[in-house]
Image (cartoon, rainbow, N blue to C red):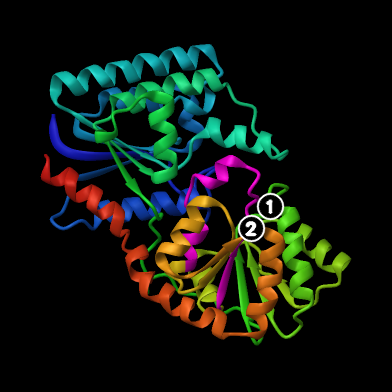
Amino acid sequence: MSHRLSLHAPEPGSPHLPATGGPGVFIRALAGLLDSHDPPLNLDLQWSPTADSGNGRGLTRLLRDGSSCLLFVYPFVPGLQKAEVPAVQASASRVYRLLRLKSWLLHRRIIVVITELPVELAAGRAVSGGDSAKLDSDGIRQLEGLLFRSAYRLWAPEGLAKSIRRQHGVDPARIRTFRRNPYLPRSEKDATRPLEFDAGTVNFFYSGSIDAHVAPNFREVLRSIRNAPTTRLHVCGPDRDAVREWLAELDVPNVRHYGLLRIPEHDWLAQRCDVGLIVYPTDDPYNHLRPTMKYSAYLANGLAVLSTDIRCVADNIRQDGVGQAMPVRELALELLRWATRPALWQQRREAAREHSEAVRAGAELKSCIAELVESR
């Protein structure tokens, strides 16, 4: 068994895992932290396309991996995406049981970094009336339980860690938590294409999808922005056609949707804005458990944050001193106040800029990596 660490994850940019989406950015940031660790780690990146999650190649690769430490990014693990197929579930269960046995016999360490909990995510969407994926909850619970209980360490956002302890009875001593997702470091290698930027007196920024889950809250924001004509709302991500229809329907001239952007263009645009918006609905209990990549992206680019009062994000905002969180109707009114009184957000934007490098450096995950290295 070689004294190396293997990261098993789908490669960002492969099918179903956009490099610029939240999970893709998280995996890129994690891989970068491991690769740049000082002293250097003997790192082996075991990239696998997401389409491989349901067949035997990814599972076989796990059993053949002779590394002393295996690191997984959950839920992007072999077997889980097709847990409803009996043969896949049976094969995955055997593999994860063997991994657990080998970890005991060979002193191999399994690290699981948790970014989402699929069953809780789907249940939350169902509660709030949004679109939820049809999952084999029992099959997923069985596989994730095997993996979580086999792990030497679980690295998870604080809100998700509570669900894991409750659902799977994992010893809290084996869990390490982080309250903010890591973001990508600044890079001069990837040239930025120039974008047209129509600056307003205050520039608001929204990054990400605007699906049926967040659409009602986003439309509240559009109605508010319409009443502050000298401001601008700059939006990037998917769903541009839907947003353009809403802009025409609601007669909102001071919003521009740039479509999907690469990270260099995304960050270039964000850094010319003042305030980042988070508008997840509060009636979805799952939204209260995760820090969201939006929050990290906004801090990394020095933006004050105005958010709906989802618990994890609200706690981070208060701790970091970078903005406010409140119900969406109040948020829409507060947005108008921020549009006319820059003193309400300028100090918070400065606070965000002070946190920027720590978020880009993945400070909290760095401590998890350092503990792992010291214990080898």
Q: Is mark 2 on a helix, strand or loop?
A: loop
Q: How far apart are marks 2 and 1 (CA)?
A: 6 Å
User: Which of 223/341 is in front?
Assistant: 341
Decide whether residue 277 is among the magenta residues.
yes
Q: What element carries label 1?
A: loop
Task: State the quadrant of the C terminus.
Answer: top left
Q: Position of residue 276 (x, y in %)?
A: 56, 69
Q: Where is residue 71 in the image (x, y as percent from the top left)?
A: 29, 37
Q: Position of residue 268 (x, y in %)?
A: 51, 75
Residue type at numbered disc 2 = Val
Q: Position of residue 116 (x, y in %)?
A: 48, 40
Task: State the quadrant of the N terminus.
Answer: top left
| CA neighbours of label 1 inside 10 A, class few (<14), some (14 to 19), many (20+) | some
Which callout, 2 or 1, points at the residue further toward the start of the chain?
Answer: 1
Residue under label 1: 214
Task: Please state the extent of the stretch shown in magenta in the rendering.
Answer: 274-298
Give the total of numbered labels: 2
Residue under label 2: 279
Query: Is residue 139 depicted above or below 307 in this figure?
Result: above
Contact between labelled residues 1 and 2, with CB atoms less than 8 Å apart: yes
